[in-house]
Structures are given as C-alpha cells and as structure tokens.
Image (cartoon, rainbow, N blue to C red):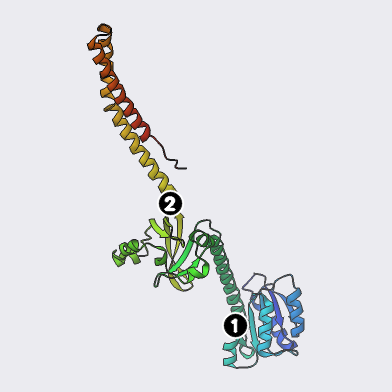
C-alpha cells in the first residue's frame, strides 16, 4: 500500500544482491516512486557522491563492503554525503557500535534482521524531516548572523547571569574601539559609567530581570579611549548557545543631543534678547524721543539746550551699550 507520493532520491550502498533486492522491495511498498541508485563498493559510492549533480535525499549504508568496513567507512561516507542523512543497515547486533555510529554523524542505525518496510520508511521519513528542521535552523542562524554582523549600528549579545559579552558585531568593534578579543574578556559593566551602574543596582531586581522589561532609553557609555557617549539602547531577551542572554542595539545619539542642547541655549538667548528689547531698550529710546521735540523749542546756544543735548548723548550711549550687549548675546555657536 502506497502511503507516500513524495519522490525520494535514494542511494543504497550495498554489495549483497539479496539484501539490496529486499531493501528495494521495502521502499516500493511505502513510497510511490522512489529513485534508487546502487553502489556495490566504497569506491563506487565515493564516485557517485562526488560526481552526482542531483543530490540524494537519503543514503542507506551497509557496513560490510568489499573495500572498506566499519568506522572508517562511516566517516568517509558521512564526509562525502555533504549533509545528506545516512542510515546504517547492518547485520551485526553491536549496540555499543550503534551508539558510536550516531556520534560519527549517521542519522540512524538499523539491524537488517529487524528491518521491515514500515520501520525503514519511518526512519527515512524521520531522517528527512530532521534534515529539513536542521536546514531551517541553519538558515535562521545564517540570517541572524548576517543581520547581526552586517548591521551599521553597534550590536552585542551578553550573558544575563554574568554579564559577559558573548558576541559583538563589527560596528560595535569599530565604534567603541575594543577588539573582538577584548570584548570577549569584558562585561557590559566595563562600558558603563560607575554612577550609572550604581543607579541600576538600586533598581528592584524584579524590574531588571523581568523579560517583559527591556528598559529602552538613553544611557552613557565609555569608549576605549575614555570618550563618554550617549546611546539609545534597544534590547530583547534571547537564548544564545543555550544561555539566557540579551541582544542589544546601540545608536550613538551624542551629536543629536549636543545639537538639541545648543538649540535650547540659543532659544534661551533669544528669550533674553526679547526681554531686553521690551524693557531695557525702551527706557533710553523713550528719553531720546521725548528730548527731540524739546530741543526744537529752545533757543540756539542756550544753557538749557546744552543740557538737553547732554541728556540726549547719555541716552544715546546707554542705547549703544544695550545694542552692544544684544550683539554679544546673539553670537550663535555653530552646531553643525
């Protein structure tokens, strides 16, 4: 009864004609259209694996070939298989060797005396699905690695238990100035200011360790050369190589904050100037405006006219000083 219509490309490495025929029958019982290739020796199997452009889905390996047997055979076939699941079929009921063969990279180990079409199909199906899972995991790890290491922003992963750096990307190495080896011997405390560490240690432990609390925000870090920078940190909890960890991305916002500070200082100056214009400038200007019509009404060369001109000069000088003060206050620092 056919229960699987997926096409399997299978290499059977078996020199015994009877055993090969049995395996072939079992495969056709459970798989609708298996594509089966046979190698009767290690030499032939090696040639097929090295020259075959159509990758195999499964390799069924007998451990007693004319030109190679046992552990050396397993090692070389696994090497040439390039990740294709290898299932060992053997007539020797050596449990210890069966366990060891699994450590050598084979997907499963089956005794020929216990082989049935169903048991063979199950191990093929299991091995194929496990390969897909492993491949998906490898693709996921590759994507993570590319996203992590090619990020233009500094990123790192650290151990939540001891705070050691577990991994850093090239951007972090370039921006902070530490080498990869230096980072590997450091903890995240080594790039934080002592007063910030103290503030963090005073927080309730439940807030620091809570996986739902990522604590984004602006923090101060120290570069290798001693320069203090402000970084916008974003983080998330992950499991990295079996360790409870945190991945962090750091965006240096020092220049942005300095720019904002400069703008705020300029705005404060403008507010001061506005107050000066509305209060201090008005006094001498009002006196000048009131003296002008009075001067017009007095006789030339009179003592009163001279006094008014003196008052006018005093007010003009006062106004000049105020204008000079405004000019000094409006000196804008280049923030670009």
Q: Residue at x 40, y 48 (%)?
A: 257
Residue 152 lies left or right of residue 40; in this view the side is left
The x and y percentages for residue 231 are 42, 55
- The residue closer to the viewer here, 299 or 118, is 299
Where 96 falls versus 253 (above or below)?
below
Does residue 217 appear anywhere in the picture?
no
For residue 84, the mark is none
Residue 18: quadrant of the picture? bottom right
Residue 69 lies left or right of residue 129; in this view the side is right
The x and y percentages for residue 9 are 69, 73
Dot 2: element: helix
- The residue closer to the viewer here, 156 or 138, is 156
The residue tagged 1 is: 108
Residue 320: quadrant of the picture? top left
Dot 1: element: strand
Crowding at mark 2 (Cα within 10 Å: few <14, some 14-19, many 20+): some
The span from disc 2 to disc 1 (Cα, nearest Å) is 57 Å
Residue 232: quadrant of the picture? bottom left
The mark that comes first in sequence, 2 or 1, is 1
Q: Residue at x 57, y 92 (%)?
A: 96
For residue 254, the mark is 2
Q: Quadrant of the N terminus?
A: bottom right
Where 96 falls versus 26 (above or below)?
below
Does residue 167 appear anywhere in the picture?
yes
Q: Residue at x 29, y 30 (%)?
A: 276
The x and y percentages for residue 148 are 52, 62
- The residue closer to the viewer here, 162 or 258, is 258
Crowding at mark 1 (Cα within 10 Å: few <14, some 14-19, many 20+): some
The outermost residue toward the left is: 304
């Amino acid at each position: 009864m056919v229960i699987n219509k997926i096409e399997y490309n299978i290499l059977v490495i078996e020199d015994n004609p009877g055993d090969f025929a049995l395996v072939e029958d079992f495969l056709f019982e459970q798989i609708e259209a298996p594509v089966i290739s046979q190698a009767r020796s290690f030499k032939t199997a090696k040639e097929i694996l090295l020259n075959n452009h159509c990758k195999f889905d499964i390799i069924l390996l007998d451990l007693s070939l004319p030109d190679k047997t046992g552990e050396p055979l397993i090692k070389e076939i696994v090497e040439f298989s390039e990740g294709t699941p290898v299932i060992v079929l053997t007539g020797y009921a050596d449990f210890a060797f069966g366990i060891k063969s699994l450590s050598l990279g084979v997907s499963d180990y089956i005794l020929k005396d216990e082989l049935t079409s169903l048991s063979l199909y199950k191990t093929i199906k299991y091995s194929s699905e496990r390969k897909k899972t492993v491949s998906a995991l490898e693709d996921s790890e590759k994507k993570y690695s590319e996203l992590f290491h090619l990020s233009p922003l500094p990123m790192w992963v650290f151990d939540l238990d001891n705070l050691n750096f577990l991994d850093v990307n090239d951007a972090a190495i370039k921006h902070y100035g530490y080498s990869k080896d230096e980072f590997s011997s450091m903890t995240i405390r080594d790039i934080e200011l002592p007063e910030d560490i103290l503030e963090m240690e005073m927080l309730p432990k439940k807030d620091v360790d809570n996986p739902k609390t990522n604590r984004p925000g602006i923090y101060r870090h120290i570069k290798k050369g001693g320069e203090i920078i402000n970084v916008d940190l974003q983080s998330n909890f992950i499991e990295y190589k079996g360790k409870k960890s945190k991945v962090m991305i750091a965006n240096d916002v020092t220049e942005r904050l300095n720019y904002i500070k400069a703008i705020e200082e300029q705005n404060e100056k403008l507010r001061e100037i506005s107050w000066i214009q509305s209060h201090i400038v008005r006094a001498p200007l009002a006196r000048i405006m009131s003296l002008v019509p009075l001067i017009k009404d007095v006789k030339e060369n009179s003592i009163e006219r001279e006094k008014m001109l003196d008052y006018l000069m005093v007010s003009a000088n006062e106004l000049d000083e105020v204008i000079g003060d405004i000019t000094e206050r409006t000196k804008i620092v280049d923030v670009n």
